[in-house]
Amino acid sequence: MIQIKVDAATRERYVKNVLEVWGAASKEQAARGRQWYRTAHEVADMMAEGDVRTGAGLLAALSPQTAWPLNVELAKAAYETKEPTGHLGDALAKAARILAGADPAEVLPMDRKTGHFYRCILDPSDADAVCIDRHAHDIAVGEEYGARERGLGAKGRYALIAHCYREAAQRLDELPSTVQSVTWVVWRDRLVGTSTRGTEFNKSV
């Protein structure tokens, strides 16, 4: 795992790694990345019959270790049946609380991945939210970690990587979530060796 407290040179290296992957995006990859959270917002809105807050909360709560198509399937089923299933106990408990009327912002860890994922889906124009998953981490540090532990459950480590995306976004005059989603598409395409699976936004850490 990377150190939580790093010097300015290391932070700058992480920012440049993000900028490098951003610069490698094709027009098609950039378009897919820019659309990603807007599409997710629409999914949340339709799934929860206009209650986008609940829809986004369910998607976020049921996102860990889950590829996007299954994530959507589980969230839709949970909303329709009012009984979340198909995930681990902690995720199911969070989803159940959201279904019972709890504010997702009071249920989800808002300083880490699922909280930021919720914010990005709820409001794709959020100028601060940035979802740091395993791929976003690897992009910033410049290395594919595979099955190695990244330690993104640590608030300080998450904040460090998120800061680097915000810095990159400021230099590009883009939203942090846009920088994350576009670079994610590029990175994922490299990993799978094809551009046909980039929308399978696996949010596992």
Image (spheres, rainbow, N blue to C red):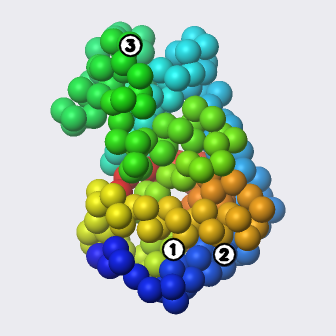
Q: Earlier in the sequence, mark 3 or mark 2?
A: 2
Q: Residues within 10 Å of mark 2 (few under 14, many from 20)?
A: many
Q: Earlier in the sequence, mark 2 or mark 1?
A: 2
| Distance between the alpha carbons at the discs numbered 3 and 2 | 40 Å
Q: Position of residue 162 (x, y in %)?
A: 50, 62
Of badges 3 and 2, nearer the viewer stands 3
Of badges 1 and 3, nearer the viewer stands 3
Q: Is residue 181 above or below residue 109?
A: below
Instruction: Identify residue for label 3.
Output: 101
| Secondary structure at numbered mark 2 | helix
Residue type, numbered disc 1 = Ala
Q: Position of residue 73 (x, y in %)?
A: 44, 28
Q: Is residue 48 above or below residue 204?
A: above
| Distance between the alpha carbons at the discs numbered 1 and 3 | 37 Å
Instruction: Identify residue for label 2.
Output: 19
**Left or right: where does residue 1 sit relative to residue 67?**
left
Instruction: Identify residue for label 1.
Output: 140
